[in-house]
Amino acid sequence: MTYVTSPHSGDTPGDFGRDLLSNLYYQRGTTLESASAQDTYHSLALTVRNRLVDRYIRTAAAHYRANPRFIYYLSAEYMLGKQLDQNLLYSGTEDSAHRALEGLGLSSSDLDALDVEPGLGNGGLGRLAACLLDAMASQDIPAVGYGIRYDFGIFKQAFQDGGQVERPDDWTFYGNPWEFHASDDQQTVGFYGHVEPLDGVRKSWVPGEVVLGEPSHMLVPGYGTSTVNIIRLWRARAARESFDLSRFGAGQYGEAVEEIVRSENISKVLYPDDSTELGRELRLKQQHFLVTCALRDIVRRFRLRNSDWDDFAGKVVIQLNDTHPVMAIAELMRMLVDEEGLEWDRAWSITRRVFAYTCHTLLPEALETWPVALVQRLLPRHMEIIFLINHLFLQEVAARYPGDDAKLRELSIIQEGGEQRVRMAHLAVVGSSAVNGVAELHSRLLAATTLRGFAELWPGRFHNVTNGVSPRRFVRLANPRLSGLISERLGGQAWLTDLDRLVELEPAADDSAFRERWREIKRLNREDLARHALAATGVAIDPDALCDVMIKRFHEYKRQLLRVLHVVAQYHRIRRDQVVDVVPRTIVFGGKAAPGYYAAKRIMRLANTVADLVNEDPVVSPYLKMVFLPDYNVSRAQLIIPAADLSEQISLAGKEASGTSNMKLALNGALTIGTLDGANVEIRDRVGADNFFLFGLDTTEVAAVRERGYDPRAYYDRDAELREVLDTVAHYDKDIVDDLLHRDEYLTLADYRAYVDCQDQVARAWRDREGWTRTSILNTARSGFFSSDRTVRDYCRDIWHVTPLRIDG
Ligand code: B1N
């Protein structure tokens, strides 16, 4: 039987309810009367999923017919967020589902609570990958995302005595109804072993260990279109017959499963590090595992409709999300030269055209390098190939800069001096046709500092693609109230796929009735947040207070510490009855720290301590409350962002590549207090300098301060209020203050006064509620640029050179 049109077109609540009962019956083997909560949830998920399958099948068939150029997005991380809310919306079954559930006496919010978000990433980089997949599908771009199906995602965060404790995220404990398994599409991945000569440059790698990669996929539906793409996640499995029956028989139960455990450990857990590198062997194994499985799958798909390697670069674009999948460059060379027998030069020309590389950082400690000795042991043939790539590249450099040994050292893929290391960013640039940063400032700094020599060598290869966020996820799903109001004002929902249309809200900023409704929605959203905060932390917050939000990973450069210092300053002011520039505020924090990042964890502990100090003080707490919501993730973001009035984007200028919470918050009508860092610069350009609270040193000033010899102590000596604040902090954590006074790597004290004064300006602005609301509306109206749809269009135009392929129906 073939479905010509969707079996679900013209769905009614009755159809939906019938399918749900049928799934309950046939998939779970039960009935409504005896179903468990999981039974009902899984049946609901399957009912919704089924409504996307037909679109997926049609997409796959159309792709097969048209044999188009595909974008293959390779990323070690994805933060997809909950699938139930998304797929209900994208399948257009929200209404019929809700009415069907109501009719069956089921609560949709109870069922949504059982939907587990796959936390297969750390922070912005992983969420960006998800927003780009969403935007590609929504714009009919043929694309597949490749990633690792970690058994354990990002840890769950709780606080004990104010400190972070990490618990495992066993996200598939009850199974994952959104996933399709394809165990017959397994790939083989080798490790270790040795290399044998064949002919000329061609060699044969004989791995010493072999692991299987087993794929499953989840649907990535487009919004407002028929396209449904997929994300393919790989899980490591031991080769068949790895179970040692004889050892088990001899009672050696641990030894009997040793090989299975070793193999399967590769996809066991996501490394919980953000913007730092830790260089463990297992991490390199993960990277190679992902890259090998993805490339073999890409080639398999290519061969379905093509046979000539000369067509490969026309049909395939591989976007490398940071350096984590960069070993793909060596692996593709190995496949083409060793396995397919292509000449080196031909293989290199194909490889270079296929890859494009996105860099997400400027922090030197985040630029991945691997010891040559480790790569040699784990991937001996890849190491040879990297050496050869480097050799040929350095010949090119030498021809361009004759006699310039310093240039060779600077650009070499191999870092010399001490232990030799492979610089993955250099390999990425050399092996790609395009390199991009993630915000204008970041791309400019990349070309001027971190990758300067490469930008001079190949200026045409460097691009900027400013990040963006999905308006479906972060406005429509997160903030249904505001979305309703916007749709009402703009006469429809077209803005959800054409976010520039938000500018049409501008006149509404001058309409007092509209402002009233805008304010009312913010208030209702703050009430929702207050309910969650009370349940999660026991702290009661005032839904009328200014909601001041800082949500992001904990990292010193992001300067959560600066936020805390301001809170302590306010605490003293209120205690002294100095309340001229004080308005009732709720400080909301959310974010995790890498488990081994002690400095970040100290700051987190301090934040919790200060929260207690403030919340328990009867004089202070009517004006100031502070809640640190544990376990920040995509779902929590969807709850916090709509309630926010003020967005804290206060990193030291030149450190934050882009930031994306800045975009999500501005789109939801929060005003930004921020430095000229990352995408803040572009947000301010667009919303207007009058509608943005700017403070702090810019990148030029930061360089000048360092040049002069930065002396943090001088700020302490000069500023009595800062002194009082630091003395208070020292009472709780002397080491934090010592570090600030003697080192202060991220110039917290240099920006302190400007920040605190700027916060006073915020308070004065908040008192003018009509003026604030006007600015809030303008922030939303002018942030349409930050849609991930625009980001994808930029990639398509400047880097991918692909065009949409509409799926009929
Ligand atoms: O990528 C985001 C940016 O908006 C942020 O500014 C940037 O900090 C973030 C190693 C990273 N850069 N590097 C990482 C993540 C995990 C890991 O293991 C590095 N994350 C970013 C999106 O462009």
Image: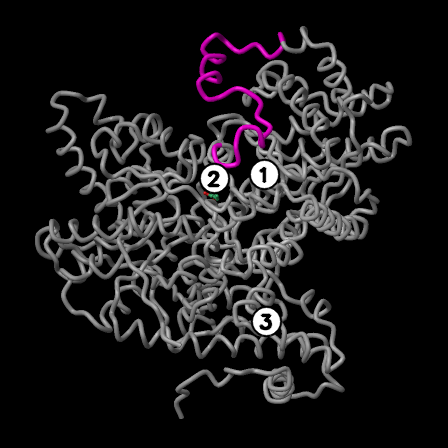
Which residue was labeled with disc 1?
Answer: 596
Q: From the Cβ of disc 3, is ligand 1 less than 8 Å away?
A: no
Q: Amino acid at mark 1?
A: Gly
Considering depth in this image, is 565 or 120 the residue closer to the camera?
Answer: 565
Residue at the image position 40 percent from the left and 93 percent from the top: 1
Q: Position of residue 575 (x, y in %)?
A: 86, 22
The quadrant of the picture occupied by the C terminus is bottom left
Which residue has dot 2 on it? 278
Magenta stretch contains residue 71: no
Query: Quick check: 526 above or below 620?
Result: below
Magenta span: helix, strand or loop, mainly?
Answer: helix
| Res 175 label | 3
Q: Element type at marker 2?
A: loop
Q: Are marks 1 and 2 in contact (CB under 8 Å)?
A: yes
Q: Disc 3 residue type?
A: Gly
Classify mark 1: helix, strand or loop: loop
Crowd band around label 3 with a 10 angstrom C-alpha radius: few (<14), some (14–19), many (20+) = few
Left/right of residue 105 with respect to residue 403 in the rendered view: right
Q: Counting residues from the N terminus, which is met first, the one under dot 1 or under dot 3?
A: 3
- Which span is picked out in magenta? 685-714
